[in-house]
Image (cartoon, coloured by chain):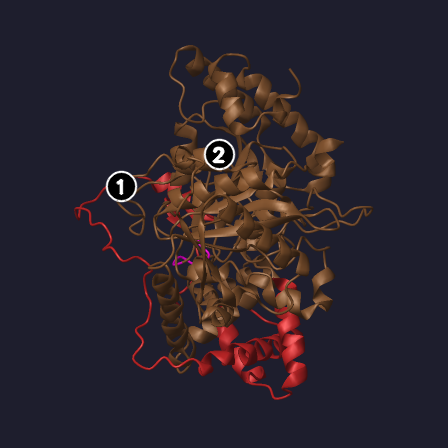
Chain colours: A red, B brown
Amino acid sequence: MDSFYNHCSQLLTRRHNSMTLDITAITKIAKLAHIEVSDAEKEHFARELSGIFKWIEQLSEVNTDNVPQLTSVSDTPLPWREDKITDGHKRDAILANAPASEYGCFVVPKVIE
Amino acid sequence: MGNPTDFTLAEARDALKAKKLSSRELTQAYVSNIEKHNPALNAYITTTPERALKDADAADVRIAKGQAGALEGIPLAIKDLFCTNGVQTTAASHILKGFVPQYESFVTSKLWQAGGVMLGKTNLDEFAMGSSNTTSNFGNVINPWKAKGSTKDLVPGGSSGGSAAAVAARMCLAATGTDTGGSIRQPAAFCGIVGIKPTYGRCSRWGVIAFASSLDQAGMFARNVRDAAITQTVICGHDPQDSTSQLLAVPDFEKALSGNIKGLRIGIPKEYRVDGIDSEISALWDKGIGWLKSAGAEIIDVSLPHTKYALPTYYIIAPAEASSNLSRYDGIRYGQRVTPQGGSLTDMYCQTRAAGFGKEVKRRIMIGTYVLSAGYYDAYYKKAQRVRYLIAQDFKNVFEKVDALLTPTAPSAAFAIGENSDDPVKMYLNDVFTIPSSLAGLPALSLPAGLSDKGLPLGLQLIGKAFDEETVFRIAGVMEEAAQFKAVPQEVEA
């Protein structure tokens, strides 16, 4: 699928030279996604994502007026359970994979000045 | 007795029960096959031979006591997307390197309760994002099949490529997979084995590392339809820990293999005759239709008009859900952490995720973040959800007239690593036959139906009504009998 995207974007940027997503947009998306992206990567993402969204635009051909959004494929209501605590007392198991922990807590960089 | 790995799962089960074979002998034979083939195929990320032999000995004790479960003593492989208590689980990502779950996924716990033996954890595309198993942080998986007269390495398909390759190369009797847009069916087709994705809600997703929660389902890979039915029966069922798993009784799918499909109505969707499909695949599809007719089924031409929009719809919905699910990898609770000198908490998040995720995963998170962001949510995400409704509705309409659908699984046979980047049609179409049924949450199975001119396996897909896996298995059993697919990869012959 990696090459799928490469392919879509190459093919489509060839067809549509306009860029729907510019560096500013990519910078914003990367910030929202909490992923540090270098300037070179931004160029790359701008080209690639623009191509992908050009391809995705074919959905606008579909008339979806008065069509509900599908939020669950299930026709039956989901089973309910009693609202009670069924689990707990697993502090050590929860902390077992933490990159840093102290005194039974996760350790994070300082957040309060 | 020949090599115990020649037994199918059903045969091994019966031989174990009859005490003609011990689980230790069987497991040892698989451990040896892994040692022999895994260095070349890279199907396993982690092997657990000691655990396997311990499991086998415990199974032999239970068999001796007459307490055998449905999979007692059967050696299995687990896609490295299922959390396994005390055994490293990576999702093939650097960000989870060294993560050792402190709990067991519901699906794998069912396998162990039934007496299954764990051989190890199989390779996959990073976070199950891919169709060729070339995005793993642990290297490419190599398909055990080679084209006639060629030594070129082929992809096993993806994302569950390691599981499919392990079953095909006899490095396990059956393996778990997960399917979001075709990640069980397409690798099953590429590796010449059976793969089943059940109805959404049949299996618990608890303890399966999430990719796109409204699509992800667990399913099994096996050498034949019966083995797939036996193992799939074990992993289905309601789990209060996954509210989307349905509170329904699970039929014994093996019992559905009646061999009789007389009078069943099978639909052939015309939209699946896409341009650019290999003529061999088209011919195989026709052959499959012929087998069904000979067995007394009624063939009905049907239309699923929104088929062509399934792919772009999927590439909005799946990345959107992925961007949300993968926000949990923040370097705090588990996995890798990068702490910049004097940096803030946000700097830590951003650098941890930059260093931990591969290219494909980052791309999908970026797409997903964008389609969910303010100002674009309506144009992309809501639109996709509406088109998804129309796609699901297409299937509902058709299933008023037919009992199941027959289509090809993939538009081509396995391709060489990197090969597809210069063939546009193939790359576009790779998941075109599997994604629509994923979006509709329907059960679908791929079975090997023949070989290409180059000697590579080709698969056909059966799609069933929601929660009607039984009909899918029943038809698959009849088709398997007609196909007489006996070929094995060169790796197995050697």
Q: Name the quadrant containing residue A51.
A: bottom right
Residue assigned mark 1 = A87
In magenta segment, residue B118: no
- The structure residue drawn at horizontal position 67% and vertical position 38%, both measured from the top left corner, is B487
User: Which callout, 1 or 2, points to the residue nearer the camera?
Assistant: 2
Q: Mark 1 packing: few (<14 Cα in 10 Å), some, or many (20+)?
A: few
Which of the pair B148/B187 is nearer the observer? B148
What is the spatial separation of the Cα atoms under label 1 and label 2, in whole angstroms? 38 Å
Residue closest to the far bottom: A18
Disc 2 designates what residue?
B226
Q: Which residues are magenta?
A: B210-214
Give how far across and how far down residue B218 sits, in percent. Answer: 44, 46
Q: Secondary structure at mark 2?
A: helix
Q: Residue at x 65, y 84 (%)?
A: A15
Question: Foreground residue, B392 or A37?
Answer: B392
Q: Is residue B336 visible?
A: no
Q: Amino acid at mark 2?
A: Arg
